[in-house]
Image: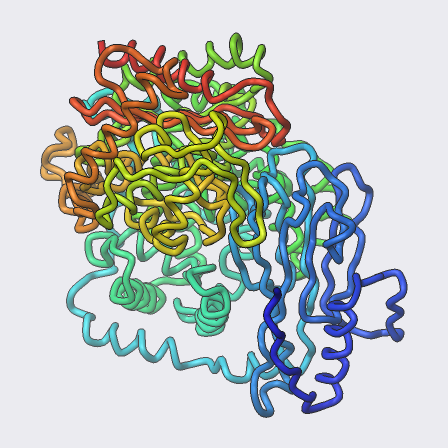
Amino acid sequence: MSPTPPPTRPPKNFMGAVTQAVQSFQTQTQVFFEKLKLKPGAKVPELWVQDAGADKAEIFPLLGDRYVVGRSSKNCDIVVRNPVVSQIHMSLNREQQPPGFLGYFWRSPFVMKDENSTNGIFRGKRRIQQMVLRHGDVYTLGPAELADAVRIKFNDPPAWYVKAFRYGVYGFGGVSALAAIVTLLEWQKFNVYPLPNSVQGPVVITARDGETLLSSPITRTHAELKSLNEFSPYVAKAVIASEDSRFYWHLGVDPIGVLRALVANIRGGGIQEGASTVTQQLARSVFRSYVGTDDSAARKLREAAVALKLETFYSKNFLLLTYLNRVYMGVGAFGFEDAAQFYLGKSAKDLDLSEAAMLAGILPAPNRFNPVRDYEKAIAQRNGVLQRMQELGMISAEEAQRARRSRIQVNPKAKEQLESIRAPYYHDQVYFDLEALLGVEVANEGNFIVETAMDPQIQATAESSLRNFVQTTGVEAGASQGALVTLDAKNGEVLAIVGGVDYKKSQYNRATQARRQPGSTFKVFAYTDALQRGISPGTTFSCTPLNWEGQYFEGCRSGGGSMDMYAGMAQSENVVALRVGQEVGLNNVVQMARRMGIQSELKAVPGLVLGQSEVSVMELTGAFGVLANQGVRNYPRTIRRVLDAGDCQDRKNPKTCRVIYAFTQDAEQNQPVINPDVANTMTDLLRGVVTSGTGTNAAIGLGEVGKTGTTNDNKDLWFVGYVPSQAIVTGIWLGNDDNTPTYGSSGQAAQLWGDYMSRVLR
């Protein structure tokens, strides 16, 4: 019996009545958008949905407070008939109206939420679980790399009076005044005249031995142009449009930009955008020793202080010139001359509009947006810069259109350089982790030495094992992709990452970026919580069918009777695991998964126990590491140490460089989260899976343990296991990017695990 709905509150005003009417309409039946006729000039929020291959987007006016988007015509208001889209993929919910007079000026925002979809919602390459929608936001249903991904855009331009109010409260002196006070207090602590010599250097990434490079060292000589006139006339315009449109207006700190970023970050519930001016970026790069590398408000204030002092001693044109000559442009390139030579094989003075806009577009994340690694993303960034230049009146609409229709000819030598990267999936993840540790802005400055945990031999074995298996057995089983992670549970060091079969064809990292249903591998969290609560592993649970929260689950494959936890785990009987989860409570299963390292969204429903909620290979492998490490959690880490290459006593000796980060000093590591006896008992339960259960294909004779996992229609094939004596954990996923069924089983994943681990550990 469904609960009685709460009484409906009477509307307080006319717009409330309209909203209530639409809500009532929505609850009674689906929204028929073709019957909604708006008045001429009416401005309402809109969702633009452009299916793969469609010439234009379909527009849905959002008059109500809740909409469901998906493939089901029965359950969804906005129906998208695309195989990438789940039956119920996402929802849009309008937040509560602000009280009082503020409700008159501001329309309540919509919140987009992933409704446990298979292929997810993505902003670029980052998967989104929940997000407050802002005007102009663009997302895809499914990874952007998929040909059938659906593009959605939220359109809700603010009214003129809202814009006027925002700009009115910004002011022009508040933030600058605070920075000015800091400048006066800190004035004698740093000198800006003359400018320090340029300290240039790439991000050098090494394996765990500290010597094996993941990418070839940059040997070219850094070059700087002597005046702005020597650059293409489009370069400065593109940079100002992209990075700092009020560069010639502010005094080093842009109060409007700061307040805009503050509002955006508050609305987004986290750091959504920064507000660093060109001068601040220059201050952070040139005066790193004073400004610091920590991601803190104090660093921001020091950065602002240096920026204001720079603006006192130098002209705008000189500062812009210095920025163009020294800004980090990825792959060891500093300044537009270096970048133009590397990416395009020409001088920065010869750049046309399209090329200048492309190079400016990679500045927010040079190692992700460069045209060699991701040409389509670089072009999208270029088009955004062109649009901004047109809006600012720097170029005409005709010039922008011509530049958008121009193809960028990437330097072949640049392709050779980046294609020579060792372990590219691991290499990419290091940059993501570096940004997480230092902040995006500091990480993008470069000039670091990053010591990783990667084991070159294990990584090479992992790559060849996955590629060969998918190209042979995988083809037979209908699985075209896979992912693999190996880590040392004693410290969380990630020894190998393989995010796909062929990096050249797809840079999407299925080991860390993808979220897939884990199937029966998730049962370990219910069993672990039961043991932690004192339930004996010899306790028996009925094998009869189960009705739970309106869902029917079949009994054991062996028939009636009962099973203890040993047999239930070994044979992967769903109904036994469900009864274990019912005994401890679904919320407690969620909490146990959290304690063991699962950070993805989890829903406390019966299907959770059977692996309904999606997780990444990385986090699931890390969670099994808790069991391998006798109950002590170590989050997976690719980075061992980060050294500041610009702060070394002897630049030829990395051991003399200042240590910015060392994972051995990380307070989050080595956290006991479950009883050691519980972890050992779970190891015993998982041993039965390999010796006599569903994972016998993983047997290699080293006392290995693990768990298989298979989802509906065999869409996902899993095996996660470890060798207790060495605490080496490996997680493997096999399947297809488009979520089509395979005709294999988790036995194939177990077989790959056994073949691979036997090569690694013998």
Residue 656 drawn above or below residue 503: below
Q: Is residue 212 left or right of residue 39?
A: left
Q: Residue at x 59, y 59 (%)?
A: 112
Whether residue 636 is visible, yes or no, is: yes
The percent position of residue 214, horizontal first and vertical second, equals 32, 24
Residue 329 drawn above or below residue 12: above
The percent position of residue 67, horizontal first and vertical second, equals 69, 62
The percent position of residue 307, horizontal first and vertical second, equals 33, 64
Q: Nearer the viewer, residue 393 or 242?
A: 242
Q: Is residue 630 left or right of residue 599?
A: left
Q: Is residue 44 left or right of residue 549?
A: right
Q: Nearer the viewer, residue 307 or 636?
A: 636
Q: Nearer the viewer, residue 532 or 287?
A: 532
The percent position of residue 155, horizontal first and vertical second, equals 70, 62
Quarter occupied by residue 295: bottom left
Q: Residue at x 58, y 64 (%)?
A: 111
Whether residue 449 is visible, yes or no, is: no
User: Which quadrant, please, contains the C terminus?
Assistant: top left
Residue 120 drawn above or below residue 182: above
* Colour logic: rainbow
Quarter occupied by residue 278: bottom left
Q: Residue at x 16, y 65 (%)?
A: 189
* Number of marks drawn: 0
User: Which quadrant, please, contains the N terminus?
Assistant: bottom right
Residue 633 drawn above or below residue 427: below
Quarter occupied by residue 332: top left
Q: Nearer the viewer, residue 74 or 263?
A: 74
Q: Is residue 387 left or right of residue 411?
A: right
Q: Residue at x 40, y 12 (%)?
A: 465
